[in-house]
Amino acid sequence: MRIRFSLRSEVAVSFFAAFLVLVAIGVASYYSFSGLLKTQEWVTHTQEDLHLLNRLLSEIEIAGSEQRLYLITGQERYIDSYSEYRQRALTTLKRINSLLAPPDIGQQQITMLEPFIIERFKIADLLIKIRKKDGFLAAQKIIKTGRTDGITELIRDYIEKIKSEQRKSLAVRVAIARKSAEKMSSAITAAIVSALIFLSLAAWIIYQDLNERLRLEDERARFFRISVDLFCVVNFDGLFEQVNPAWEKTLGYAPVELISRPILDLFHPDDRTAAMREIERLTLGFTITDFEARTLCKDGSFRYLRWNAVASLPERVIYASARDITEQKRLIRMKDEVIAMATHEMRNPLTAIHASLSVLMEEVKQSLKPTAEKLLSIAYQSSSHLIELVNDFLDIQKLEYGRMEFHIHPLPLEPLLKKAVDLNSAYAQKNGVSFHIRGFIPPVTVNVDEGRFLQVMANLLTNAVKYSSQGNPIQIASSQWDDFVRISVIDSGRGIPEEFQSRIFEKFAQAEGSKQGTGLGLSISKAIVEKMGGNIGFNTHQGRGTEFFFDLPVVPKSELPKKTSSSTT
C-alpha cells in the first residue's frame, strides 16, 4: 500500500536533506579553508623568514663595509655606523631564531650559522681596537690573513642554503594545498548539485501546493463576490481595504467608494462609541460575535447590521462579515410593541385589583375562614408579582428602544445609599434579615438619575434578601479607586451556580431553584448603570455568598456647581 505523506512532511524532508548537504559543504569548506589558512600562514611565515635572512646578510655586509672604511680612514663616524648595523644584525638573528622553531626547515642551519656571525663581529671588533691602538698597518696584517673574508663567505653560503631549502619547502606545500583545494572544489560542486536537486524537489512540491491554494483562493473569491452577506477587510487604522459587492446591493456603496474610507463613518452616531470599543477589542486579539449596530446607507437611511469579526494581529487587519437584520428587527419591534401595548393596558386593571385585594386583606381578613384567607393571600401575592413583571417588562422595553428618560445630575453618594437602605428596610425585616452599611462612605459626588440609582439599589438589595438566610445581615459597602466609586451589596447566601454565571445579566435569566422574581431585574440594572457611565459585575463563592457591585464615575470637585450666597434688599 502506498503511503501518502503530508505536504509539510514532503517539503520538510526535502529541505532537511538539502540542509544536511549544505551542512556537509559547510564542514568540508571549513576544514578546507582552515587548511588554506594554515598554508597561507606558512607561506607568510616562510616569506618573512626569507626577508629576514636577506636583511641579516645585508646588515652583516654593511657592518663589514663600515668597519673597513674606518680601518682605512680612521674616522670615528664609521665606528658608529658599524656599531648600529652590528646591533641590527644581532637583533635580526634573534628574530630569525624565534621564528625558526625546531620543526621549521633551516633552524639547524641557523643554529650552526650563529657562532660564525658572532665570530665575524668579534674579529671586526678586534680590528677596530687594533686600528685605534696601533694604527692601520697593524690592522692590515690581520686583514691579510683572509680570515674575515672566509667567515663572511661561509655566512653567505649558509644563508643561501637556508633560503634554498625554504623555497623548496614552500613550493611543496603550495602544491599540496592546490591539490587539496581542487579535490575539495570537486566535492563541494557535487554537494551543491545534490542540494540543488533536493531544493528543486521542494520547490516543485511547493509549486503544486500553491496551485491548489490558488484554486481554493479562487473559490473563496467567488464566494466573497456572490455572498449576500457583507464581507470586508479593515486595517488597524479603521480604513476599508476590501469589500464585496453585497455592500452595494445592501447599502448602495460601490466598492471604490468605500476603499480607504473610515469604517466608523458608517455607524450611527449613537452606535459609534460602542463600535469603536469593539474595534479596540479586536486589535487586542478578541473575537467579536453578534454585535448589532445601525449602519449608514448611501441614501442617508440606516439599516441594522449584525457583525462578526476576527483580527489577524501579524497582518494588522480585521476580517469582518455583516448581515442585514433590518427586517428582522422591524418584525421583533412590531411584536414587542404589541406586547408592550398589551402589558401597558394590563397595568391599570392589575393595579386596581391589587389595591382592592390590599383593602380586603386589611378590612375583612379577620372575618374570613382560613381557606378563604389563604386564597386571598395567594391572589394578593400573585397580583404583586404580575405588577412587578409588567413594570419590569415596560422598563426593559424603554431601555432597549431608548425611551427611558434619565435626569442625570451631580448628587452626593452618602444620602443616596442611606435612602436606598431606608426604602428597602421594611422588605428586609419582613424576611428576617437586616441591612448594614459597612465602613466609611467616601464623600464623593456622582452623576446619576436619583430614581434610577435607587431602582438599581432596590434590585440588588431585594435580590440579596431573597438569597440570604434569616438572621444574617446584608452588607452595603463603598470604596473609591482612581476616578470611580464602587458600591457593593454582599449577601451570605449559597452563591451563584457556575453554569448560570455567564447568563446572569440576560433577560429572563433565573438560576434553578430561585425564589420568585421576573428575571429582568439584573438586566435592567445593567442597562441603567451603563446609561449612567458605569459598569456592573459580581464576585461569588459557592456556599459563602455573593457580592454584586457597580462602579460609577466620580464627579471631579472642579466640575461641581459652586455654592453662591444671595442677599435680598
Image (cartoon, rainbow, N blue to C red):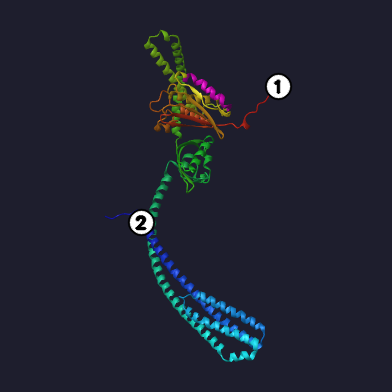
- Amino acid type, callout 2: Glu
Q: Is residue 526 among the parts visible in the rendering?
A: no
Q: Residues within 10 Å of mark 1 (few under 14, many from 20)?
A: few
Q: Is residue 395 among the parts visible in the rendering?
A: yes
Q: Quadrant of the C terminus?
A: top right
**Disc 1: which residue:** 567
Residue 421 part of the magenta segment: yes
Q: Residues within 10 Å of mark 2 (few under 14, many from 20)?
A: some
Residue furthest out toward the right:
569
Position of 473 with respect to 83 (left or right) is left
Position of 54 with respect to 17 (left or right) is right
First along the sequence among labels 2 and 1 = 2
Magenta stretch: dominant SS? helix
Question: Residue 77 lies in what quarter of the image?
Answer: bottom right
Position of 314 with respect to 6 (left or right) is right
Tell me what residue is drawn at x 69 percent, y 23 percent: 566
Query: Answer yes or no: do the residues labelled 2 and 1 have beta carbons within 8 Å?
Result: no
**Disc 2: which residue:** 10
Tell me what residue is drawn at x 64 percent, y 90 percent: 136
Residue 238: mark in rendering: none
- Amino acid type, callout 1: Ser
Q: Is residue 366 above or below residue 403?
A: above
Q: In which quarter of the image is the N terminus?
A: bottom left
Please tell me whether mark 2 or mark 1 is closer to you in this view.
Answer: 1
Q: Is residue 286 above or below residue 195?
A: above
Residue 345 part of the magenta segment: no
Q: Which of 20 and 202 is in front in this view?
A: 20
Q: What stretch is highlighted in magenta?
A: 409-428
Residue furthest out toward the front:
133
SS for tag 2?
Answer: helix
Q: Where is residue 116 in the image (x, y as percent from the top left)?
A: 53, 83
